[in-house]
Amino acid sequence: MSSKIRRKPRIGVFKFASCDGCQLSLLDAEDELLGVARAIDIAYFPEASRAMLKGPYDIGLVEGSITTYHDAQRIQEVRRKCKTLITIGACATAGGIQALRNWKDVDEFIRVVYATPKYINTLKLSAPIAEHVPVDFELRGCPINKYQLIELIKATSAGRKPNVPTYSVCMECKRKGNVCIAVAQGIACLGPVTQAGCDALCPSYDRGCYGCYGPMESPNTASLSNQFHILGRDNAEITRAFRGFNAWAWQFRKAGEESERT
Amino acid sequence: MNKQQTRTIKVETLARVEGEGALYVKLKGDQVQDVKLKIYEPPRFFEAGTSPNFPILWRASAEFVRSHIR
């Protein structure tokens, strides 16, 4: 065994356009929190601590999408300071629910929402972090799964590949012994094209999957759209189905736009 | 405390004020002279989702919930 004491990894948590839910998953670790705090050195985490230590950081956890010019500059700086950059959640990984505006005229939205539009500074698109800087790992979910986050931090600190499965939600249903709600009840469910991670939360309660974890590794969205047609859904409904928290993920984007065109 | 003493309170990061923000307060004695609140959270335009002007895609979530319930 090496006599050298391994230095704890310094972690920075950075927020962009988001709801804070994903970074709070780290604090929500409850039973594991003390262990996590022992294993890592939280250097920058404004949501949790006023102590804001300067970089560089070993691991940067980035939450939120890039929607302003200022944030587009800031992410470059964050990338420079972090050895490993990890995006957490649907906003950082796919643009988030706010990416729905990418199909609309944002200037019109500004006029509708704000009394003094000139105060508002925003880009045309809500873009995932990877469209601006190279990202080392993308953790999916809206919100992320705290156990996957802990696994990811452990794996990154140890320099191994994180064990985060990329198969579909269907696998989780099968493992839980759920009767398929799409087959048995004819409910429109995005489970077959969505990555696992939520332990099939909605299908376990007789609701179709909303696709919170984004596209699985090889989603057959065309086949699922066809199945939705068989279940009696029209094209507009199918487009809406793909336009949720991960609407801007290219596989869902393509599927939604194909239904919109036809 | 001196009644004429001026104090300023600057909070660069307020984690939870409709997103992130900053606060500046200037006091003279026990009188507040100036308060500035800055919300620098990027806008996400959820309010537009409740507008009837954008009836189809923007209300995706609410309608999808409805289409999910048999």
Image (spheres, helix red, strand yellow):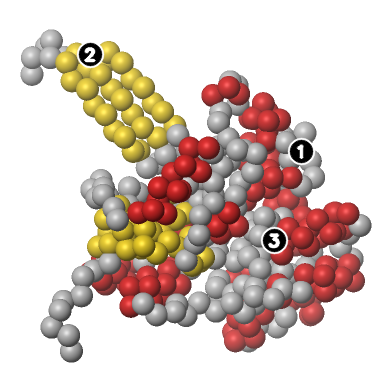
**Where B8 falls versus A92 (above or below)?**
above
Mark 2 packing: few (<14 Cα in 10 Å), some, or many (20+)?
Answer: few
Q: Position of residue A126 (x, y in %)?
A: 61, 46
Examine the image and state in which quarter residue A229 appears: bottom right
The chain under label 3 reads A
**Residue A187: which disc?**
none
Q: Is residue A162 above or below residue B11?
A: below
Label placed on residue B31: 2
Q: Is residue A77 above or below residue A186?
A: above
Q: Residue at x 66, y 68 (%)?
A: A215
Q: Are dots 2 and 1 on a single chain?
A: yes
Q: Which residue is mark 1?
A: B54
Q: Amino acid at mark 3?
A: Trp
Q: Residue at x 8, y 14 (%)?
A: B2
**Kind of residue at disc 1:** Phe
Which one is nearer the viewer's eye here, A162 or B37? A162
Q: Position of residue A119 (x, y in %)?
A: 54, 24
* Residue A34 in sight from this viewpoint: no
Count residues near mark 3 (Cα–Cα under 10 Å), then give few for <14, some for 14-19, many for 20+.
Answer: few
Mark 3 — residue?
A250
